[in-house]
Each structure stands twice: as C-alpha cells, then as structure tokens.
Image (spheres, grey):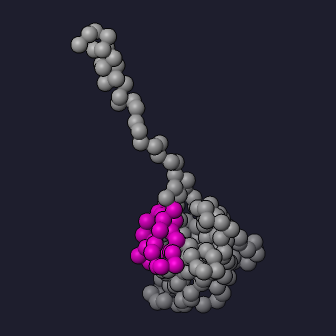
Amino acid sequence: MNKRLGFAITAVILLAPGCSILPEPKPIDFYTLKPAQVSHSAAVSKRQISVAEPELADMLQLERILRVANNGSIVAYSEARWSAPIALVWQNWLLDALWRDARFDDISSRQQGLDAQWQVAGRLQAFHIIESTAGAFATVRFDAQLIDIKNRRLTASKTFQAEVALNDSSAASAVQALGHASEQVGEDLLSWLAEPH
C-alpha cells in the first residue's frame, strides 16, 4: 500500500464520524392554549376557589396533539406537542381565566394546598381532533364538578362540550380549532361557576 492511499484511508476514517446519511431531525413545535375571554364585571360572585388537575381520558395522558381517524385509530401530529401534559395545560388555562375574571377572587391551585371554600374539578373527556366524512373537527368536553370543600360535598356537576371545524390538516390549525372550542367551553363553564349554588 503506498503512502498516498494510506493517507486517503486515514482521512476517510477521521471524517466519517462527522458525516451521516440520516436525515436531520425535524424541529418540534410546542403549543399552548390562548387565554380565554372573560367577564370584566365588577361584582364578585365567588371567592376562595381552588382548581384541581382534571382527570383525563386514557388517550390524553401525554403531551401529544391527537386525532382520531375514521377507522377509530389514534394518530399524533409528529412534529407538534403541547407545552406540558394536557392536564396541566387545562388546569393552568382555567386558573388564568378565573384570575382574570372579575366575578371570582382568591384563586389557587389544588397543589398549593391553600384553604378554599370551592374546588373546581372534573374529567377532560375529549381534547382532540376527530376525522369524519364531513371533515375534521376539534372536540373539547369537560365534565365539571363544583365541590364545597368546607362541607365536603359535591354541590353541582355539568358537562360542557364544543366542536370547531379545522381549516386544514396542519397541527397549527388543529391547535387553533382546539383553542376556539376551549373558549366556548370556558365561557359556559365560567358563567356556570358564577351562578349561585
């Protein structure tokens, strides 16, 4: 083997670790919900409200943005995630809405362990995209519970649900539609919480 060939082989070996035939990984986009529309009424109807993390349907346990196909299979958008587990995304979104809504005061999360008169709990049954023959749409369903902590009793419960069509098949469109559906659910939920119970 001549010296020239030896140098060429050595150069290939040294440069090989820096080369790859694998494609570059695509970046992941992280999403969260936009703040809900809230009332700016000056009258406070409820104080000392604690917000619990919601229970979740099985398929909502991760940070993935999901869609359910016509055949019932569950598919995730490959290059998109929620910024946190879905339970936290929902809890933080609801906490923010209550803080900014003038009808409520003394808001806390259940994790803080502060004294509260009321607790908002429940189950987030749907928070995903559904594909149908009529097109894809976002669906949000929250089975809400209002608990009187001081008297240790369930005061009221109600299901809130909304559906919004997608503009296209992108993850951004899915998040936008889920945001609009959440706004509808949130508006009805906050109005219900403001009622006398």
- In the rendered image, which quarter contains the C terminus? bottom right
Q: Residue furthest top?
A: 3
Which of the two residues, 53 or 69, is positioned nearer the viewer here? 69
Choose between 45 and 93: the one closer to the eye: 93
Viewer-side residue, 93 vs 27: 27
Residue 62 is a magenta residue: yes
User: Can residue 96 be seen in the rendering of this structure?
Assistant: no
Q: Is residue 163 above or below residue 157?
A: above
Q: Quadrant of the N terminus?
A: top left
Which of the 4 image quadrants contains residue 21?
Answer: top left
- Quadrant assignment, res 137: bottom right
Residue 68 image offset from top left, x and y in percent: 50, 75
Residue 69 falls within the magenta-colored stretch: yes
* Residue 188, visible in the rendered structure: yes
Left or right, 166 with respect to 68, comes to right
Figure check: 163 above or below 76:
below
**Residue 99 image position (x, y, % from top left):** 63, 67
Q: Nearer the viewer, residue 114 or 125?
A: 125
Q: Horizontal and vertical percent for residue 35?
A: 66, 65
Residue depicted at x 61% and y 70%: 178
Q: Looking at the image, which residue is at 71% across and 72% down?
A: 38
Q: Residue at x 40, y 32 (%)?
A: 19
Query: What is the x, y in percent for residue 125?
Result: 50, 80
- Residue farthest along the left direction in this orientation: 1
Q: Which residues are magenta?
A: 54-77
Dividing the picture into quarters, in which one does residue 104 lie? bottom right
Q: Looking at this rendering, what residue extends furthest in the front direction?
A: 1
Left or right, 15 with reference to 83 = left
Q: Residue at x 63, y 76 (%)?
A: 135
